[in-house]
Amino acid sequence: MEKILVFEGTKVEMQEKARGYYQSIRGLVLWETGREITVTFAKYGGVRARFQFNALFSGAAAQFIVAIENANSGLGVLCVYEGDWDSRLAMSYASRFVTKCFPSTTDKQKRGILKELGELMYTVLTEFDSLVVERFKTKELTAEVRIDSYEVLTDIEWIEQIMDESAVGTGISSYRVLIERNIGDSEYVAYIPALRLGAMGRDLEEALQEASALLKESISEAINRGLPLPRDNSFIDILRIDTDALHMRMGDITSEG
């Protein structure tokens, strides 16, 4: 399988590009199936991803059209492949495209986005191409083995492996940094959840520079030792505490004392 077209743009622009590709093979399509879905990740702060995946056969070769769009920003990537399907190659490119379309998401969020895309690909591909069935027969036993070559697309551990390989190949890794200003002075603390470490600076710029240096040092050490790169699985949530109720409770305890 080889990549024959990559286009970045809005949903409308990608649709126009896809129509142009269809027109170039008009009359040659013998079989086609596809799906389009929009997924909202409420636990990721409302990140919305739109996917389209089509598989078609023109008689000479199979073609696969993948569209990944950040529905919040409206920007996405369209990619067309030709030839025998290659799950590793497709997911590797998808990982890079998701990083490009969702630059502010963590690794955990990107993994969730890719899992949804992988499940869509699996659904379409199993419609497009039946499972391979192999039958074995001996004097004592008759067996039937069904080989599902697309199931790997839904394997979260395999997706993580592809993400690691893609990150090394592109040099792109994103890490969340939490900023806190110390009360009473002008110092800032930049905390890096992926490392469980923080860096301090006399101002925000210096704190971020120190955090960047800390990250580069940790990544370089991991590469030199042949270890996986630090992974950012952090996300932000809010805890609400009824402080009035606590004040009342502590007041009752003080009164009883």
Image (cartoon, rainbow, N blue to C red):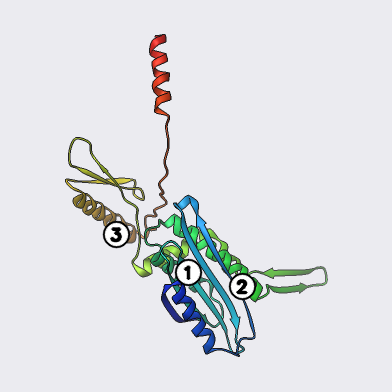
Please, what is the three-letter code of the amino acid marked with disc 3?
Ser
Q: Secondary structure at mark 2?
A: helix
- Residue at the far front: name it: 12
Residue 31 picture quarter: bottom right
| Residue 219 placement, left or right of 28 | left
Position of the C terminus by quadrant: top left
Which residue is located at x 49 percent, y 72 percent? 67
Q: Secondary structure at mark 1?
A: strand
Label 1 and label 2: CA atoms lie apart by: 17 Å
Tell us which disc is closer to us: 1 or 2: 1
Residue 174 horizontal/vertical position (percent): 35, 59
List the residue tagged with mark 3. 220
Residue 111 horizontal/vertical position (percent): 47, 59
Q: Earlier in the sequence, mark 1 or mark 3?
A: 1
Please, what is the three-letter code of the amino acid marked with disc 2?
Leu
The residue carrying pointer 1 sits among few (fewer than 14), some (14 to 19) or many (20 or more) residues within 10 Å by Cα, namely many
The residue carrying pointer 2 sits among few (fewer than 14), some (14 to 19) or many (20 or more) residues within 10 Å by Cα, namely many
Q: Earlier in the sequence, mark 2 or mark 3?
A: 2
Q: Earlier in the sequence, mark 1 or mark 2?
A: 1
Instruction: Give the answer, above or below, for where 111 lies relative to 235.
Output: below
Label 1 and label 3: CA atoms lie apart by: 31 Å
List the residue tagged with mark 2. 125
Which residue is located at x 46 percent, y 67 percent? 69
Which residue is located at x 60 percent, y 90 percent? 27
Residue 28 visible in this rendered orientation of the protein: yes
Is disc 1 in contact with disc 3, using a CB cutoff of under 8 Å? no
List the residue tagged with mark 1. 68
